[in-house]
Amino acid sequence: MKRKTIILMFLFLMVSLLLVSCQALGSTPTAAPDATEVPLAVLDSALVVEGRLVPKETVQIAFNSSGEVAEVLVEEGDVVQRGQVLARLGNRESLESTLANARLELAAANQELLTAEQALKQLEKDLPTAQTTALQTLTAARDQLRDAERNLRALTTPAEQFDIDEAKANLALAKKALEKAQEDYEPWENKPEDNLTRAAFLSKLAAAQKAYDAAARLVNNLTGTYTNDFDQAQAEAEVQIAQARVEIAQQEYDQLLLGPDPDEVALLQGRIETAKQRIEAANAAIKAAEVAISNLELKATIDGTVVEFNLIPGQRISPGALVARIADFSEWYVETDNLTELDVVDVEVGETAIVTADALPEVEMRATVERISDISEEKRGDITYTVRLRVDNVDPRLRWGMTVVVRFEK
């Protein structure tokens, strides 16, 4: 502070006065010499303060969780890198199992989401085909209804002669086809049942017989030569069934014209929403497990040297308890809180100063002001501000915390 400057000035004046007094007492009366001009003493105007030598950065480290120390990986004096693991707590296997299960659940949920989304897209993609199929089904149902109604009319109303003639012609053709099938089958009739040719001719004969019976039944119905209450009731039932099929086919076709089946869409959308919820829950579980595993490790937060380390295997640890300190000695700084409100206004960031350690007064080091605190403190009755200076050429013999004198030259 300027107080030191004032003391130095006072001492300088006292020494000067003593020298003048001694010369006056020891002198004898002589002729007065020629008058000479005495030069004025120039007082030192430099600002001088005290400070301490500190490393570039220091950090204290603690575990974020409680547990028992399982591994100690460094010692005091070791140089470490940011992120390097210094020690570990136990219970890692259980947490890693939880993490693995959460990752499996995430994979399964992602697969379910993908499958449901693809199925929903496929519904849209298959819509034109589904519409075509529904129209074909509707057309077939209408044809069946028309045939059933025609058959019922044949049983309940006199047939037109044209229909009778057509039915008789179809009966004749069916009879001829049946006779041809019988002729083809007769040479093979006594062959073994597993004979493929015999089986093929027998199948053709059965189909021809069925077609002939249907044609004969139609002729009988049209001509009224064979009809009864049972046939009429059966025909009416077939009409009702065919009508129901037409209604169902019409509803399905009309619905597809509006888009995919809403029930299927709702089902797939529900699967998608459920899968998303599973993914969210799995991600949260993964994050929680990763944080818990990370909290088992004590890591360096800066590059530097381990200057304090208080851990041994088996030791019980509480979260937040400081167990290590790391210092970065790559650069050295001086911190001083001796600048009062009257002094600090004369100091600027970027200004240079001369630093001298009390332990090595013959060594001068140059320093540059890097930061001036914006917050004041009240110390020794003065309002003071902390100033931090970077030292350019630190003597290797100096140590952390040594007292130094900082001289701001003006």
Image: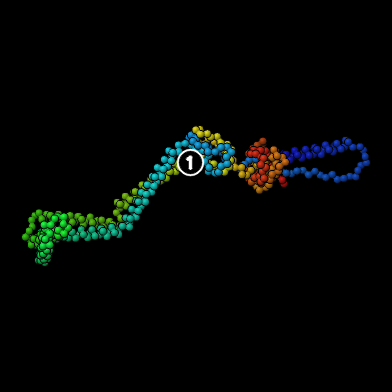
Q: Is residue 205 left or right of residue 251?
A: left
Residue 81 as seen in the image, left or right of residue 197:
right
- Between 298 and 21, the residue placed more toward the observer is 298
Which percent across, then down, holds residue 59?
A: 57, 40
Residue that protrudes farthest toward the right in the picture? 31
Name which residue lies at 54% across and 36% down: 323
Question: Relative to residue 2, is residue 117 depicted above or below?
Answer: below
Residue 271 on image: x %, y %? 34, 48
Q: Which residue is mark 1?
A: 294
Q: Helix, strand, or loop for circle 1?
A: helix
From the viewer's perspective, tell me whether residue 102 is left or right of residue 367.
Answer: left
Task: Locate the N terminus and report the quarter of the image it occupies.
Answer: top right
Residue 215 visible from this viewpoint: no
Percent position of residue 112, x then y: 36, 49
**Residue in front for this viewpoint, 340 or 197:** 197
Q: Residue at x 61, y 44 (%)?
A: 330
Q: Residue furthest left?
A: 225
Residue at (13% x, 55% y) in the render = 192
Residue 198 position by quadrant: bottom left
